[in-house]
């Protein structure tokens, strides 16, 4: 007891000094903003800011500073309370979901955060920590986002409204929307910002996890689409049911729900994970449809599955125990387009995969890896390990762990961003 009492202030001082040193290092770099990685700690309601070069945590941001106000609104609205509790029980594994996705403005002064349990997106001033704007969903849950290459447009998936909203990232004003299937999920802009690769995952929280009766199974899981959307007018250009595409390629009874995806540099080939599958799929968005079917717009259909590749299945859990139907959840590709990085959610590893040869190296990362993304400089893959509250940084070239970083409770989305140098000074 006495030793603990003596050590506590010493440890607190050491932590404060470490933070100050990191901030000073950050200020030493030139340029208008500092390269960082944001780690969303979903159950905490925080985001850990990590220096992209040194891999040291710089600061923890409160993403729910208005929690009291939001909870007062929820508990006085029966419908909102019902969904809040349902999200906690069915999707959050007994926890509220406070921090899902996040992006900074290019000047490094504002952080946009989607907050599933509060059914909104907020813009947080990085210097003060205060909320600058708030955009409530039309439905009852927000989810994945996407940001345009110019950093001005923000997409947010409105889970229960089956819609993706487009916002002005600086003001939170709505500028458009496009339709999706049930539970819209990931949004990936092309390099020129003209198109978006989008997927809806359906009702991953239902107990019908085995397609014994195909029609009933599909009905209960809802509509699950993989689609390409034109940003000019936000119109759907192409739409596929990936379960049907897989069946056409000789893989029947696989799920239609496209989970995380990685778009190749040529933006023709897309690499996908689907529910319950321990591996990855290659999809050619320009291949001619072998059956001569028509597409979403009535034109001749294109698009075909060209590869289905298994990775080791280690879990002994039944499908019904998979986290939101996710065998694997997290897929990234290095900028050169040669190497994939997959998060083996139910298998406890990350896989570094040669795109051409399909050879892989498994990296032991711990319990429930839940996302993978490229580091700021493209030579690293950052994998969130939600079961142990860590992020593991892996070298693409060697497949070896560079650093393991302790973060907050249940890290999920990890995104590259920037923080303005004058904001870093206020953090000191």
Image (cartoon, rainbow, N blue to C red):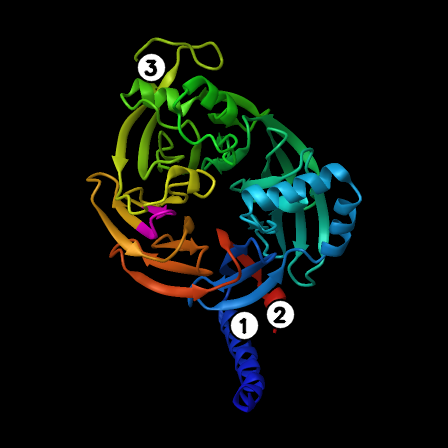
Residue 427 is tagged as 2
* Disc 2 residue crowd, few under 14, some 14–19, many 20+, Cα 10 Å: some
Magenta: main secondary structure: strand
Residue 67 occupies which quadrant of the picture?
bottom right
Image mark for residue 321:
none
In-front residue for pair 71/28:
71
Please tell me in which quadrant of the rendered image residue 243 appears: top left
Stretch in magenta: 341-350
Which residue is nearer to you in this view: 206 or 357?
A: 206
Q: Where is residue 293 in the image (x, y as percent from the top left)?
A: 38, 9
Q: Which residue is drawn at 47% across and 40% down?
A: 324
Residue 119 visible: no
Residue 48, position as x, y percentages in the image: 54, 61
Disc nearer the start of the sequence (3/1): 1
Which residue is under mark 1? 23
Q: Please tell me whether mark 3 or mark 2 is closer to you in this view.
A: 3
- Asked whether residue 68 is drawn in magenta, I would say no
Mark 2 and mark 1: Cα distance apart in space:
8 Å
Quarter residue 309 falls in: top left
Residue 289, disc: 3
Residue 348 on the magenta segment: yes
**Badge 2 vs badge 1, beta-carbon distance below 8 Å:** yes
Q: Could you tell me which secondary element the residue under label 1 belongs to?
A: helix
Q: As drawn, is 61 to the left or to the right of 197?
A: right
């Amino acid at each position: 007891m006495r030793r603990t009492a003596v050590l506590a202030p010493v440890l607190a001082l050491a932590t404060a000094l470490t933070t100050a040193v990191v901030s000073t290092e950050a200020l030493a770099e030139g340029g208008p903003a500092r390269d960082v990685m944001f780690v969303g700690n979903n159950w905490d309601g925080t985001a850990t800011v990590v220096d992209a070069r040194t891999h040291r945590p710089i600061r923890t941001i409160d993403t729910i500073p208005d929690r009291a106000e939001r909870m007062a609104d929820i508990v006085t609205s029966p419908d909102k309370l019902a969904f809040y509790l349902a999200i906690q029980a069915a999707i959050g594994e007994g926890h509220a979901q406070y921090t899902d996705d996040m992006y900074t403005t290019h000047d490094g002064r504002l952080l946009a955060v989607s907050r599933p349990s509060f059914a909104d997106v907020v813009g947080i001033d990085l210097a003060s920590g205060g909320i600058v704007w708030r955009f409530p969903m039309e439905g009852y849950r927000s989810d994945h986002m996407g940001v345009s290459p110019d950093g001005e447009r923000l997409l947010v998936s409105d889970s229960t409204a089956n819609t993706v909203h487009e916002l002005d990232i600086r003001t939170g004003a709505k500028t458009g929307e496009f339709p999706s299937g049930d539970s819209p999920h990931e949004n990936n802009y092309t390099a020129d910002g003209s198109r978006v690769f989008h997927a809806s995952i359906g009702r991953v929280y239902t107990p019908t996890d085995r397609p014994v009766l195909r029609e009933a199974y599909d009905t209960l899981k809802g509509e699950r689409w993989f689609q390409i959307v034109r940003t000019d007018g936000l119109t759907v250009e192409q739409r596929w049911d990936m379960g049907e595409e897989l069946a056409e390629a000789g893989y029947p009874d696989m799920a239609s729900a496209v989970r995380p995806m990685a778009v190749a540099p040529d933006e023709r080939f897309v690499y996908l994970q689907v529910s319950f599958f321990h591996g990855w799929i290659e999809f050619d968005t320009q291949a001619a449809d072998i059956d001569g079917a028509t597409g979403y717009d009535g034109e001749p259909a294109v698009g075909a599955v060209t590869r289905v590749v298994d990775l080791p299945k280690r879990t002994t859990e039944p499908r019904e125990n998979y986290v939101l139907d996710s065998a694997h959840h997290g897929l990234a590709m290095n900028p050169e387009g040669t190497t994939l990085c997959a998060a083996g959610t139910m298998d406890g590893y990350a896989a570094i995969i040669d795109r051409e040869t399909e050879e892989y190296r498994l990296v032991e990362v711990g319990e429930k890896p839940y996302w993978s993304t490229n580091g700021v400089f493209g030579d690293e893959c950052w994998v969130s390990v939600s079961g142990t509250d860590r992020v593991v940084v892996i070298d693409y070239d060697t497949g070896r762990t560079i650093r393991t970083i302790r973060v907050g409770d249940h890290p999920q989305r990890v995104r590259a961003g920037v923080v303005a140098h004058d904001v870093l000074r206020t953090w000191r």
